[in-house]
Image: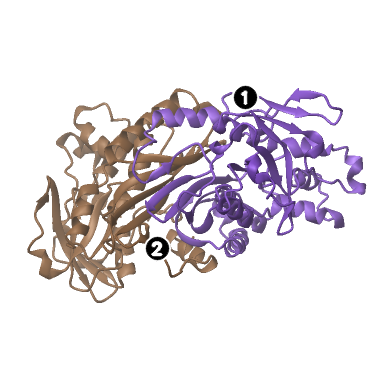
Chain colours: A purple, B brown
């Protein structure tokens, strides 16, 4: 079956999507960029969050509401924009109108307050299955959005935070282990992710990042997206990847941190490239969030991972793509 | 069950939705208005179009694609804005990825070209049922958006076009009568509605309209929305309402034009109020579209319809509301 990527290309061919004027950047990046006047760029993204696809009936509604907005807002973090307004389109089954909806809205309010967002409008429809679509608008200084396409061969590849934690949290949740004490932090990464808004802004303002994307579908998939947009390849080192630390009592689950970090979705960390001349100024932490160089971009348009053993192998995108079976 | 209106109020109470700054108008109108710099207002609306709710599997996909964008864009017509960009969030079942999607996108392209819209971004997700969410951005001169809330008691109430045609077209479609010759125009009103973009801009630019809304849910329901926002009532005359003309061969269907015109949805005509001092300049037609005065706003906050017999009765909103049974 076609991947989401090829579907987006098909839509872009079918419907007029490029123009001069105020649209500086259209489909294919994390968000669109509009230069509505000289001093500011406005960044707009739209994102669906559907029951049965992006979350399950078993998920607490308050967490679903939080995560829906976090997920959409993370696309702004990946451009370096500051969130301002959002629009919500709700499709609601009658059974969800009561307490469930109140909890969902409560979670969304918490996210809106945390991210600095105001609700500017929306739409509501009765529908057999629950879904919400969020359009988020942010702003930043003109010319500063960090695109997926800005990497050049030889740039360093870096990530924020730890990868695979949200996926590990999901596995705990699926196994019903969410009441355990040490599960909380990992579950929170799955249920209530924090878009890296401040870091994204900083990477854009300082022009530290030449290209950027948020890791929503998994490192292997999102790295492929960034490289494709930038027309480069990548070479990353397994030993450098800041993978989830699995607490002792969960070792019996036999989950390997590296695949979780490579292909697990929903971390909402930032994956970015840094030109070598700027790399010396890249801190090891930014306000407590670790920043880790995991490799570099290369001219040849393939993704390679160097195993701890020193052997190299091709890295195939095996993260989340709702249009493709997971490999 | 709660109406859509009360649901929107609940959301507005739950989530921070008002702020100073660039958001001039938030939830509750046809669209939000952003004053991003001094000379222009930007108008943003978001709209879901779901299979089984807004259209049926029996509908031709090309028409569904056209109508999805027409429906969303009509909210901009109702403010007087000129459409510029849109964002599409697609939820697609695997069965719809082939020819069906191509036809849907073809219809959407035709609408985009017709309305002057460029696709600026979007999102795609695999999902058991088909749905699309569209966010449309338009622009206009600062301070000129026509709100729902601008009517004052004594303003004249006017509508564009003929009402009930789309509903009549739907009835023909439901009865499988769409291959008949005289059905075409009425079916087109149902399948391929035209938002009144030029008229909306003109009514805003000339400040002819003091308040405006598009008739998407039916005259009785949308008039109630406008009156509620303006804190006025209305008194309209049945004999003045430009109702669908039912061709001779369909008279046997025993459909009364007046209820179709009062409660039928999907016409996407404009309903607007005109201060009396400006009414003398209101033409009978605008570029071929009839403009008809059907009554006036009143101080008492009820809706009244004066029947052809001269008797008055309360007019209850009985148009489309997916959250309420139709009366």
At horizontal 17% and vertical 62% (from top left) the residue drawn is B208
Same chain? Circles 2 and 1 = no
> Can you give x and y, in whole percent of width and height, for residue B136 in the image?
38, 48
Q: Chain of mark 2?
A: B
Estimate how packed mark 2 is, as few (under 14), some (14 to 19) or many (20 or more) residues with alpha carbons within 10 Å.
Answer: many
Give coordinates of residue B216: x percent, y percent. 32, 51
Q: Which residue occupies 56% across, 47% down?
A: A75
Q: Which mark is residue B28?
A: 2
Q: Hey, which residue is sitting farthest left in the picture?
A: B280
**Compared with residue A17, is residue B316 higher up or lower down, i.e. above or below?**
below
Q: Which residue is outermost to the front?
A: A277
Q: Which mark is residue A301?
A: 1
Please identify the residue farthest to the bottom as the structure is shown: B299
Q: Is residue B163 above or below residue A230?
A: below
Comparing A110 with B252, the one in front is A110
Residue B308 in which image quadrant: bottom left
**A164 to the left or right of A19:** right
What element does badge 2 sit on?
loop
């Amino acid at each position: 079956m076609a991947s989401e990527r090829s579907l987006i290309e098909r839509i872009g061919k079918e419907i007029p999507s490029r123009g001069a004027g105020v649209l500086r950047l259209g489909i294919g990046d994390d968000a669109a960029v509009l230069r509505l006047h000289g001093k500011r760029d406005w960044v707009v993204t739209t994102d669906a969050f559907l029951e049965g696809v992006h979350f399950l009936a078993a998920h607490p509604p308050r967490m679903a509401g939080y995560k829906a907005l976090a997920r959409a807002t993370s696309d702004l973090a990946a451009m370096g924009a500051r969130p301002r307004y959002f629009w919500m389109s709700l499709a609601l089954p009658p059974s969800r109108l009561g307490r469930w909806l109140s909890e969902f809205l409560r979670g969304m309010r918490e996210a809106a307050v945390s991210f600095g967002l105001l609700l500017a409008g929306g739409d509501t429809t009765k529908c057999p299955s629950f879904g919400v679509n969020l359009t988020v608008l942010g702003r930043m200084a003109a010319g500063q959005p960090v695109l997926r396409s800005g990497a050049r061969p030889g740039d360093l590849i870096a990530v924020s935070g730890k990868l695979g934690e949200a996926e590990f949290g999901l596995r705990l949740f699926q196994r019903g282990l969410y009441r355990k004490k040490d599960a909380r932090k990992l579950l929170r990464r799955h249920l209530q992710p924090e878009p890296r808004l401040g870091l994204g802004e900083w990477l854009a303002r300082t022009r530290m990042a030449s290209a950027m994307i948020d890791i929503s579908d998994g490192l292997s998939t999102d790295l492929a997206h960034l490289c494709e947009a930038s027309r480069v390849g990548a070479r990353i080192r397994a030993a450098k990847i800041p993978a989830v630390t699995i607490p002792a009592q969960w070792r019996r689950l036999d989950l390997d941190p590296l695949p979780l970090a490579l292909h697990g979705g929903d971390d909402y960390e930032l994956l970015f490239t840094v030109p070598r001349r700027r790399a010396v100024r890249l801190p090891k932490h930014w306000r407590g969030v670790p920043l880790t160089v995991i490799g570099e971009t290369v001219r040849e348009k393939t993704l390679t991972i160097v195993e701890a053993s020193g052997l190299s192998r091709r890295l195939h995108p095996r993260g989340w793509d709702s249009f493709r079976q997971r490999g």
